Image (cartoon, grey):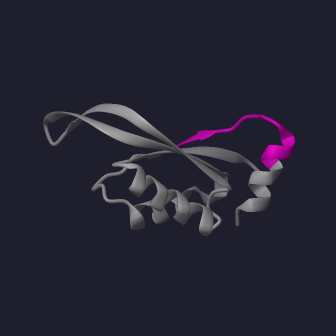
Amino acid sequence: MAQTLAYITAENMDEALRIGRALVENRLAACVNALENMTSMYMWKGKMETSREVVLLAKTREELKDRLIEKVLEVHSYECPCVVFVPLTGGHREFLDWIDAETE
């Protein structure tokens, strides 16, 4: 099985924890890390924005990407949340096997 890392941003830690729990409880991610105090700069509706966000890193399987996106959209407050994936091309085999075992 192929594993991937989902990169997701959230408005604050409460939202990040809500999203992370939903992903793990629904077995769409084996583990989610929430990293506070990230500063984002971006254009939104023609205006430059700067905001504090929380980054979520979710370890999952390639074939769960669409379902993971659906779940994030279900619980996220943003109109257009960031959910992107970075393929995992290697790593500690036992850890990668654990991701497989802990996801649907």
Q: Position of residue 101 (x, y in %)?
A: 79, 60
> As displayed, is residue 40 above or below residue 34?
above
Membership of 90 in magenta stretch = yes
Range shown magenta: 84-96
State the count of labels. 0
Q: Is residue 48 left or right of residue 65?
A: left
Res 67 seen here? no
Q: Position of residue 83 (x, y in %)?
A: 45, 48
Q: Position of residue 102 (x, y in %)?
A: 74, 61
Given the current orientation, which residue lies at the most extreme left position?
Answer: 46
Q: Is residue 62 left or right of residue 49?
A: right
Given the current orientation, which residue lies at the most extreme right position?
Answer: 94
Q: Is residue 97 left or right of residue 47?
A: right
Membership of 22 in magenta stretch = no
Name the image quarter holding residue 103: bottom right
Residue occupying image coordinates x 85% and y 41%: 93
Residue occupying image coordinates x 68% and y 56%: 30
Q: Nearer the viewer, residue 85 or 27?
A: 27
Residue occupying image coordinates x 80% and y 45%: 95
Q: Position of residue 14 (x, y in %)?
A: 40, 56
Residue occupying image coordinates x 77% and y 56%: 100
Name the image quarter holding residue 77: bottom left
Res 88 seen here? yes
> In what quadrant of the picture does the C terminus appear?
bottom right
Q: Nearer the viewer, residue 44 or 34?
A: 34
